[in-house]
Amino acid sequence: MTPFDFVAGRLEACSSLSRLEARGTVRIALRNAGLDASAGPRELAVVLRKVLPGELGARGIEAGAALCEDIARALAQQAFEAKTHEEGPEEIFRRLAGS
Amino acid sequence: MIWLAALGGGSFVVVSLVLGPRLLALARSSRQLPEFTIGLCLLLMGGLGYPFAALARAMTALPDDTRGLMLGCSALCNTVGFAALAIFTWRVFRPKHPLAELLVIGCIVVLALLIPAEAVWPGLVASALSVEPYAGAPGYLRVVVGLGILYWAAIESLLCGRQLRRRAALGLADAVVADRVRLWAIAMSCASVSYTTSFVLSFEGIDLAASSLGAATVGTLGLASAISAWLAFLPPAAYLRRLRARAAAS
């Protein structure tokens, strides 16, 4: 299970959203944060606290912030298979100015 | 307005001659492909290819063979430079996309075939003596392939820059790096539009020096591209301080 699957599954279980709606909402929040479904637990925790509550509010879900905080806490307890680190544009461009 | 075009082109040459070797030196120590390809691209295209072509056409007092040789050097520099830019864009922004890999291989093969084709049709000396900047179909085709590579680099870096700015706003990316990608996107976009303007003017048979609007466009974009590349890869300490302060404040 990936961090994205975990968060979308929890959102579906704890809200009135269907599986498709929950996954779609998390995807939109990730996109607004400049991420995609391959985001790690650290990135997802930030999205849960700073972006997803707004998306849930826009969909008429009450107490979205509290729900997201609960999911973020559960996410922190969960162990995920470590991803092999792949160098992305951020790492490459960091090196290019010699910084 | 030709002075503005000269200023824009000249500044881009100077910046490329400084940044290209610097990035190649960085590649020598890091042994990484992105540093090598971007360094090669700046040095060969901006630093050598462009001045070689400009001198071959402008220095009419030189022997025809010398002018032809200079134009051949320019074609070679631009070909290798465009190939390096395509490899950089693929490896940095789309490393896992087979279609991108295929596209890069296709571009390199076409560019490699166009050098001998240009030497034969119309011939390097004939091309140097021609009033047209890109004499013959191979010359035009090389510009079209090069423009495609430039626009691809611009689009990928614009998209990546937008993603990184969003991440940086949430504290998930370094604001300085996000700004560096944005500056590279500006440099590539300006270079693409400037190159397109030169190409369209020459295609329409309009001399750049005779077109105020064309010269102003090419000059302004060349200058913007040079400044952006400089700020991206050799940023002054004051610029970095201002960036970090702005990121901390937001």
Image (cartoon, rainbow, N blue to C red):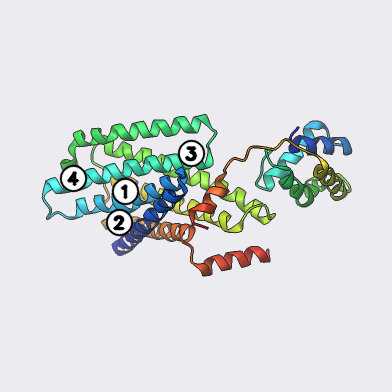
Residue B204 visible in the shown view: no
Which of discs 3 and 2 lies nearer the camera? The answer is: 3
Could you tell me residue B30's position as x and y percent? 47, 49
Residue at image position (30%, 45%) is B77
- Work out whether disc 2 and disc 4 sit on a shared chain: yes
Tell which of A60 and B67 is nearer to you.
Answer: B67
Residue type at the position of mark 3: Trp
State the image coordinates of residue B156 (x, y, percent, origin top left).
Answer: 52, 43
Depth check, mark 2 against mark 4: the one in front is 4
Picture residue at 57% right of the left edge, 68% below the top: B241
The residue labelled by disc 3 is B90
Quadrant hosting residue B73: top left
Identify which amino acid the numbered label 1 is placed on. Answer: Leu
> Disc 4 on helix, strand or loop?
helix
Mark 4 or mark 3, which is nearer the start of the sequence?
4
Q: Secondary structure at mark 2?
A: loop
Viewer-proximal residue, A85 or A59? Answer: A85
Identify the mark at residue B40; answer none if there is no mark. none
Q: Marks 1 and 2, Cα distance to the nearest angstrom?
A: 8 Å
Residue under circle 1? B201
Label 4 with label 1: CB-CB less than 8 Å = no
Q: Is residue A13 above or below residue B203?
A: above
Mark 3 and mark 4: Cα distance apart in space: 32 Å
